[in-house]
Image: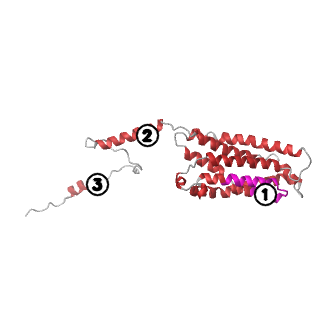
Amino acid sequence: MSRKPIATGLNRRQSSTPHYQTFPTAPPRTRGHALSSPFDSSNDQDGFSNADDEQHYNHNHESPLPRRQLAVLAVIALAEQTALNSISPYLPQMVSSFPSTDTSRIGLYVGAIGSSFAAAQLLTNYFWGSLSDRIGRKPVILLGAILTAAAFVGFGFCTKLWHAILVQAIMGIVNGNQGLISTCLGEITDRSNQGRAFVWLPVIYGLGAISGPALGGLLVHGESSGKESTYPFLLPNLVAAVILVVEFTITLIFLEESLEEAKDLPPLQDR
């Protein structure tokens, strides 16, 4: 009968894991590329080659811009900014016309009206974004445009300070289109052309910041040049509402749904 070899101290030392007296170094967090071996299959090498070729192609290839949809989104953004910025020229004059208004606190009242819109929009932006994830971007943009147009008409009929604050808050609640425009831009472009698409968005907002105050100031001057009116600030608000109705029509006809999941839903008229 053969006897099993007895493990000696030498054997134990040879079989144990060596410990080096070096500075403690954490192991690498990512694994490096394995060294190529003559026993590696050619399929693996072909896979790495194809992946490199695809990455090189995606890096050099630039997708064409969807110019028609970009133009539609530009019209939407310009209409929104023109309408919203048209209020600023006549707002101090409007507040001064309200009865029982302390003229020394006009700036405070104007700030309260503007803040009511911004605060309401801040609190409801997430809701509109979440709703657009369920029913699509286009229906929410349409709803925001037409409801904002109605709010502008109501703002033109305001005769008291609390009326103006309330209507501006409602306008902020129903309007979440600014964030949706950026979302649509991201969905109709890819990594290769997003930079060229998004660079135009601040330009459109800048144009709206020019056209809006010019329009509002011009229309208020024309309205106040004649005889005194019960609603002297109705005209610029009606024009702003018309601009938003035009935006609604263009969106309804030309804007394509950018959310892939919403394309499987029935048409708007059948929902």
- The residue to which callout 2 is attached is 55
Q: Main secondary structure of the magenta part?
A: helix
Mark before the other along the chain sequence, 3 or 2:
3
Image-quadrant location for residue 268: bottom right
User: Which residue is depicted at the point 26% across and 56% down?
Assistant: 16
Apparent side of residue 204 relative to residue 193 in the rendered image (left or right) = right
Q: Which residues are magenta?
A: 143-169
Q: Is residue 66 above or below residue 127?
A: above
Measured in 3D between alpha carbons, the distance from the residue under mark 3 to the one under mark 2, in whole angstroms, is 42 Å
Return the x and y of residue 250 as percentages of the image width and height. 66, 46
Measured in 3D between alpha carbons, the distance from the residue under mark 1 to the one under mark 3, in whole angstroms, is 77 Å
At numbered mark 2, what does the secondary structure look like: helix, strand or loop? helix
Return the x and y of residue 171 as percentages of the image width and height. 73, 55
- The residue to which callout 1 is attached is 165
Residue at the bottom extreme of this rendering: 1
| Crowding near the residue tagged with mark 1, few <14, some 14–19, many ≥20 C-alpha atoms within 10 Å | many
Q: Amino acid at mark 1?
A: Ile
Q: Is residue 196 above or below residue 258?
A: above
The C terminus appears in which quarter of the rendering?
Answer: bottom right
**Residue 74 can be seen, yes or no:** yes
